[in-house]
Image (spheres, helix red, strand yellow):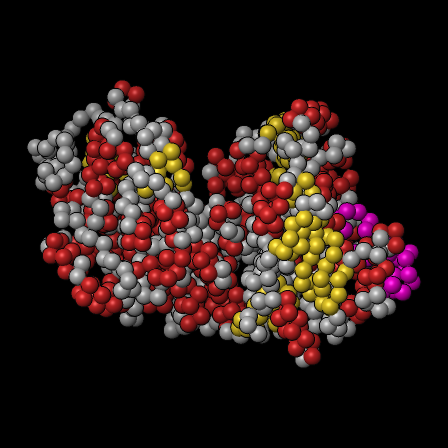
């Protein structure tokens, strides 16, 4: 094969699970480059009777994209849209095409693919065909099966054929037509009873009255009968004037009771949201992530459209009038509607935690009942959960009777509770005429329970169908027919706790001691992981595999996984790294946290922290990487770059003794290159210059003339002059002090113009960022302890602390609390730390009305703005965005990392990826700039990357403001 065939331990770990509870380690993973290679691989595997599982984005919550033997990843290369026919309203696609890519290609023709699951920016169409995916607009457009015209497939015999509509398709599968004729009554009574009956095989499509449609039948068979090589899909017109009606109810069952009457008005979508999920969104994303909602504890989101704006408005009013809601709101297409849909899109990840913050698991993920039974089903399901003492955050496609729910079933030790709960839940859904699955398929999670909703005759019929297509049982075995047990191959019980406390053993895992009785202020442990019960295992299992990290940043507007954006390799995505860490802590495949597979997996992690905010499950891979490095090298020699880059503030202070000489020497190639090489850095990099006068020295000298012109000379340098002006502590990090003193100098000018009294502490206070990023957590803790001694008294006394370098500011707002969880000074400093934009726009700290402050006019500024990854992840960029808009600047705001990411882009072996990441957004934007346009970036790394790769000098926001005072 030209495509990759990979049997490495690391690769097998990455593909050992999907978004489900299940872990099945394959023997190897294959990445075919063409459909011919898929067929060739299947020929070999069938001859050897090796099981094979086809996989797209790997976002299955039922475990139907993991399996023994071989995994075929069809997402990496088979991603071509061959044609979009606007006349026929069809598209021809390969199975690895991402659903949002098809939407993008169809949009210029006024078309779209109807089904749109919340994972559409990473879900592949092959996976959607395998699971019969639906999404919120299935009310209007149906399931994937309803939108498939024909499929190019190969079955378990090796027969390649085109499945379509009519008796001709049956000829490709001898015996199928006869089997259908012999079981017409059984099929008519047990299959296709309501729209979301996805569990089992959808045999109703083979009935003559339904067109004997083999293509539609094969949709939802979960790769157990055929492997899909291509598809012809129907497209639908884009709706006109889509408008969102939000109705509030006392609770979710009451909202569900209203669904049948609302369906009479032909909505495009009816989605249900629980107040508990909305509260989680507010906590995780901030109050601004949720628009003002009508009264209620449960809501229906009803989208209408298709006519003129007046017609849509009248329809929205009719829906409000027909409902029994206690409150209502109407959102035309715009920011409020977008935020509501974002809540819904993030549900799959955010619902991975209960309201109490406990881990919730899929399994009973997408049950469905006829919509008229949904309210009663929800009440009984609530009672069942209360009896088991479990909780979750329900939401779902209420217009189709489909409920999404993850439950905090205790999986840490065994799957016994999972088995008993799901058995009772299946019996409950059967009483309401429902389906175990409404859109994700049965997989390993529910196939064993099919006899609870189907008769023995129907189950036997599905087994006969399987035998016609795949007699050797090599296609996705253990799913639907002859299923694996619900509680077999569970991932979580296989992993023992790895507490955050205590010394580290030889294998990189836990030693014999614990930190109990040792203060975390002075102890030798790494991060506390208090949000995960002080357990690294629980932390890495936050990743449930929803795969948002695989989404294209340009489409999603996120920053997550910059190295994956460059390589498109599962190795370099947050989920892939989490899977390797999960295997390391269970120890059965990867040999502990010090294993080479772990180092390889984490090597290209930029520690950008974007996953900590963009991942709906709250995975913080930067923190995990730092912890792993801490445990791996504690008490051992480290790579040389850990000393060269991890101790950078030390070297900067030494360089401050003779900065001109150091800069001159390091500008000479024959000196610079050996120095970089010896320090573990890439010799293609330049060494940033050290300032001839640091900010702190400039401050001590009382605004020396080499500082900012026009500022008054301080008569008593270093002393706080008593005044009535509000005081702000200007904290200068090591980068701003030694390499970019113009930034804090500009901050002094802006703060004083805004009426603040600037306080610069007499003692230096390093946040330990470079120690954290290289996993030297003991060293980081020592520096942060010194910082707390310096800044703690100011914070405790209510002084705001201004941070200038985003990465260092983020340490004070996040890492500080994880390293000092019990220290009240840490909480005070974190709460007092602000960015400049936050300081100037927050009513609690903004300049007083009588200060004479006016925001400088930036209406003449056109700029590319690069938000720092750590600011995006920890503080957010909303205040900066608002301030720039208020000042009148015209900006192009980038989404994505600059690629330098502190020490990452300087290290040997990272240069090419660093440049590739910069090519995602930063470098093309800089090349497109016209003369006179600005580049604004608060991050020292971002400015360094721009000047080294494109020759563009950047400015911090505070410098732009200071220049226009």
In the rendered view, would you say 369 is above or below 717? below
Regarding residue 572, the answer to whether it shows in the image is yes
In this picture, residue 200 sits left or right of residue 94: right
In the rendered view, would you say 863 is above or below 440? above
**Quadrant into which the C terminus falls:** top left
Q: Which residues are magenta?
A: 176-203
Regarding residue 609, the answer to whether it shows in the image is no
Toward the top, the furthest residue is 850
Quarter location, residue 75: bottom right
Q: Position of residue 915 (x, y in %)?
A: 37, 57
Which residue is pictured at 22% across the width and 37% down the height?
746
Toward the left, the furthest residue is 715
Which residue is pictured at 67% across the width and 80% down the height?
48
Q: Position of residue 879 (x, y in %)?
A: 38, 35
In this picture, residue 837 sits left or right of residue 447: left
Q: Position of residue 296 (x, y in %)?
A: 62, 31
Which residue is pictured at 67% across the width and 45% down the height?
86
In the rendered view, would you say 307 is above or below 819? above
Q: Position of residue 424 (x, y in %)?
A: 73, 54
Judging depth in this view, the residue of 868 and 555 nearest the camera is 555
Answer whether residue 184 is magenta in the image: yes
Quarter location, residue 853: top left
Answer whether residue 863 is magenta in the image: no
Judging depth in this view, the residue of 883 and 922 nearest the camera is 922
In this picture, residue 764 sits left or right of residue 390: left
Which residue is pictured at 73% across the width and 68% down the height?
160
Quarter location, residue 494: bottom right
């Amino acid at each position: 094969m030209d495509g990759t065939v990979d049997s490495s331990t690391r690769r097998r770990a990455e593909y050992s699970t999907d978004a489900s509870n299940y872990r099945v380690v394959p023997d190897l993973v294959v990445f075919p480059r063409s459909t011919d290679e898929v067929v060739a691989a299947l020929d070999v595997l069938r001859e050897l009777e090796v099981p094979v599982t086809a996989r797209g984005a790997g976002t299955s919550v039922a475990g139907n994209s993991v399996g023994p033997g071989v995994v075929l990843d069809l997402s990496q290369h088979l991603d071509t849209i061959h044609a979009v026919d606007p006349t026929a309203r069809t598209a021809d696609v390969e199975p690895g095409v991402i659903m949002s890519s098809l939407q993008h290609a169809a949009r210029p023709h006024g078309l779209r693919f109807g089904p749109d699951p919340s994972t559409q920016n990473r879900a592949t169409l092959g996976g959607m065909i395998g699971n019969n995916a639906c999404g919120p607009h299935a009310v209007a457009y149906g399931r994937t099966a309803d939108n498939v015209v024909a499929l190019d497939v190969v079955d378990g015999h090796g027969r390649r054929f085109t499945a379509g509509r009519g008796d001709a398709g049956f000829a490709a599968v001898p015996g199928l037509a006869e089997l259908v004729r012999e079981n017409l009554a059984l099929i008519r009574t047990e299959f296709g009873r309501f729209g979301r009956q996805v569990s089992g095989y959808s045999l109703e499509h083979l009935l003559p009255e339904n067109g004997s449609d083999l293509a539609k039948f094969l949709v939802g068979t979960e790769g157990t009968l055929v492997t899909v090589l291509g598809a012809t899909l129907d497209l639908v017109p884009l709706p006109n004037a889509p408008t969102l009606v939000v109705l509030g109810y006392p609770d979710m069952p009451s909202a569900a009771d209203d669904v049948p009457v609302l369906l009479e008005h032909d909505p495009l979508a009816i989605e249900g949201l629980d107040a508990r999920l909305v509260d989680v969104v507010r906590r995780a994303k901030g109050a601004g992530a949720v628009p003002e909602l009508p009264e209620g504890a449960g809501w229906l989101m009803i989208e209408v459209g298709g006519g003129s704006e007046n017609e849509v408005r009248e329809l929205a009013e009719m829906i409000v009038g027909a409902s029994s809601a206690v409150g209502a709101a109407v959102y035309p297409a715009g920011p409020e509607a977008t935020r509501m849909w974002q809540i819904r899109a993030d549900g799959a990840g955010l619902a991975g935690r209960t309201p109490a913050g406990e881990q919730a698991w899929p399994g009973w993920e997408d049950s469905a009942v006829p919509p008229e039974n949904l309210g009663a089903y929800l009440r009984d399901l609530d009672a069942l959960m209360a009896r088991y003492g479990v909780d979750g955050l329900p939401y779902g496609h209420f217009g189709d009777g489909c409920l999404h729910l993850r439950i905090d079933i205790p999986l840490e030790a065994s799957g016994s509770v999972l088995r008993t709960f799901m058995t009772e839940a299946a019996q409950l859904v059967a009483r309401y005429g429902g389906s175990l699955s409404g859109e994700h398929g049965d997989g390993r999670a529910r196939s064993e329970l099919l006899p609870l909703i189907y008769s023995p005759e129907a189950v036997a019929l599905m087994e006969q169908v399987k035998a016609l297509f795949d007699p050797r049982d090599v296609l996705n075995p253990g799913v639907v027919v002859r299923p694996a047990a619900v509680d077999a191959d569970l991932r979580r019980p296989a992993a023992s706790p790895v507490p955050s406390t205590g010394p580290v053993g030889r294998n990189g895992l836990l030693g014999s001691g614990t930190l109990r009785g040792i203060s975390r202020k002075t102890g030798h442990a790494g991060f506390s992981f208090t949000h995960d019960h002080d357990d690294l295992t629980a932390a890495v299992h936050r990743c449930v595999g929803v795969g948002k990290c695989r989404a294209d940043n340009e489409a999603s507007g996120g920053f997550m996984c910059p190295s994956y954006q460059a390589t498109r390799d599962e190795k370099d995505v947050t989920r892939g790294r989490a899977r390797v860490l999960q295997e390391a802590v269970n120890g059965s495949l990867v040999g502990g946290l010090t294993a080479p597979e772990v180092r390889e997996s984490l090597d290209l992690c930029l520690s950008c922290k974007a996953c900590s905010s963009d991942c709906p499950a709250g995975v913080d891979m930067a923190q995990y990487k730092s912890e792993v490095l801490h445990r791996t090298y504690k008490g051992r020699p480290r790579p040389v770059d850990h000393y060269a880059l991890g101790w950078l503030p030390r070297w900067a202070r030494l360089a401050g003794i003779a900065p001109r000489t150091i800069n001159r020497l390091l500008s000479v190639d024959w000196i610079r290159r050996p120095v970089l090489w010896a320090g573990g850095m890439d010799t293609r990099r330049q060494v940033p210059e050290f300032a001839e006068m640091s900010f702190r020295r400039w401050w001590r000298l009382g605004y020396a003339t080499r500082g900012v012109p026009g500022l008054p000379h301080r008569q008593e340098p270093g002393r706080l002059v008593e005044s009535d002006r509000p005081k702000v502590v200007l904290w200068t990090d090591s980068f701003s002090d030694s390499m970019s003193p113009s930034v804090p100098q500009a901050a002094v000018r802006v703060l004083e113009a805004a009426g603040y009294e600037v306080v610069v502490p007499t003692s230096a206070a390093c946040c330990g960022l470079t120690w954290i990023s290289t996993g030297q957590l003991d060293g980081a803790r020592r520096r942060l302890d010194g910082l707390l001694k310096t800044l703690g008294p100011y914070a405790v006394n209510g002084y705001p602390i201004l941070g200038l370098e985003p990465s260092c500011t983020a340490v004070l707002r996040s890492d500080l609390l994880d390293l000092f969880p019990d220290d009240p000074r840490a909480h005070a400093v974190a709460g007092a730390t602000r960015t400049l934009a936050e300081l100037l726009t927050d009513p609690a700290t903004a300049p007083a009305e009588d200060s004479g402050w006016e925001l400088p006019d930036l209406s003449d500024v056109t700029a590319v703005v690069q938000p720092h990854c750590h600011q995006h992840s920890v503080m957010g960029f909303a205040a900066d965005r608002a301030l720039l808009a208020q000042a009148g600047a015209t900006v192009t705001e980038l989404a994505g990392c600059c690629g330098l990411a502190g020490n990452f882009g300087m290290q040997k072996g990272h240069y090419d990826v660093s440049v590739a990441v910069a090519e995602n957004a930063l470098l093309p934007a800089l090349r497109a700039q016209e003369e006179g346009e600005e580049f604004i970036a608060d991050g020292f790394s971002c400015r360094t990357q721009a000047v080294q790769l494109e020759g563009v000098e950047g400015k911090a926001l505070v410098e732009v403001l200071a220049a226009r005072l």
